[in-house]
Image (cartoon, grey):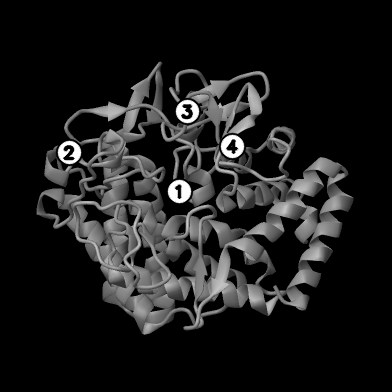
Amino acid sequence: MNKELMATLDELKIKVKDCVQDDKLSQVFDQCIDNTLETTVKITAEGDTFVITGDIPAMWLRDSSAQLKPYLFLANKNKEIKHLIAGLIERQIKCILIDPYANAFNEADNGHCYHQDETEMNGWIWERKYEVDSLCYPVELAYLLWKETGEVNHFTPAFLEVAKLIIETFKVEQHHEQSPYRFERFGERPEDTLTNGGFGEPVGYTGMTWSGFRPSDDSCRYNYLIPANMFAVVILNYLNEIMLSIYEEPIVAEQASTLAKEIDSGIQQYGVIEHEGKQVYAYEVDGLGNYVLMDDANVPSLLAAPYLGYCSKEDVRYLATREFILSNNNPYYYEGEYLKGVGSFHTPPQYVWPIALAIQGLTSTNNEEKRQLLEMMAYNDGGTNFMHEGVCVDNPEQYTREWFSWANMMYCTLLLDTYPEIIK
């Protein structure tokens, strides 16, 4: 970080300390807000921005967006922040053009990878698990940078090419039987591979777009992942606006808008389930009558629907779904001596994710609930002043991932949302 950026962050930390009036909450914020920029962000020789997820030396399209998104409010105050975010978008565009089905990439064409999988790999790809949200996050970040700062230089010819590629990929995966994508992994967890020779389980047409894997990187049980399709609706509408306002591409804009309507219609027709007298959103469906009622800590999640911009916090169907998620009816909701909240199949039972606690706060209309969640996160950090992937509800010193930048930044996001006067 340069001196100007360090000064900007130091000023922010002083405001946090004055507003929050809790040394522990402030200490965690201070470490987390610095850590992402100090340890995960690199400006490459090409001038773009490469962001590792933390303890893994690769860049996820999802995680990298989520790691830098919380800094957007500083982009008008600090040129380096705006440059870093624009550089990340530039890098993400390059990655999607390499392969829209890959979820994580190397800094260079070096052949490094998580596992030797049966799929179409190349030297840039760290992992090729197709996740719908991987194509959503970069569009969201580009849109929000424009709205926050008025910056449009990141809307290049390459971005237009990527927009068309995302639309085309989503359309292909509305009819997965026509898809070229296959993925198999041998010798690992069953959740790390797709069945049927890498093709996945059968699905029926719904209008939604197919996803091989959840944002946890675990395979879908049923491959129309509702929260990912919600996010797709949001970013397709963003693309519609970008195509009309920036590129003057009415045909591409109409394609994005039409696809958003088709996917949303599919969500409403196939993704809404009657549960205990209320309509709630399923987590996954297959278009053949099968569904799973649950939610997972990773974002996009059903809990995050208002945070992603799909619906309002007061939406009746969302509130019913939220009530289900934050109860023992959700198989991944856990309560213990120290924590209660949503975990994931990706981590051990009885482990709650700070990311999910942050999302619970960011989608709440109750400021006292937000404060309680902040305290739960900060005071159960295992004595590290950092967030983690999952934390044991009965022993906060037991956690997964010592270094997880996305979780750190979600804590910062919730704190700033709980105390909006800090950034006014």
Amino acid on which the number 3 mark rests in the picture? Pro
Q: Are marks 4 and 3 in contact (CB under 8 Å)?
A: no
Secondary structure of the residue carrying tag 1 is loop
Instruction: Determine the CA span between mark 4 and mark 1.
Output: 15 Å
Amino acid on which the number 2 mark rests in the picture? Thr
Q: Are marks 1 and 2 in contact (CB under 8 Å)?
A: no
Identify the residue position indicated by label 4 in the image.
360
* Residue mark closest to the camera, 2 vs 4: 2
Of mark 1 and mark 3, the one earlier in the sequence is 1
Residue at screen point 30% across, 76% down: 161
Note whether 253 is above or below 121 in the view shown: below
Of mark 4 and mark 1, the one earlier in the sequence is 1
Of mark 3 and mark 2, the one earlier in the sequence is 2
Secondary structure of the residue carrying tag 4 is helix
Residue 113 located left or right of residue 196: right
Q: How many marks?
A: 4
Q: Position of residue 14 (x, y in %)?
A: 86, 58
Secondary structure of the residue carrying tag 2 is helix
Note whether 409 is above or below 291 in the view shown: below
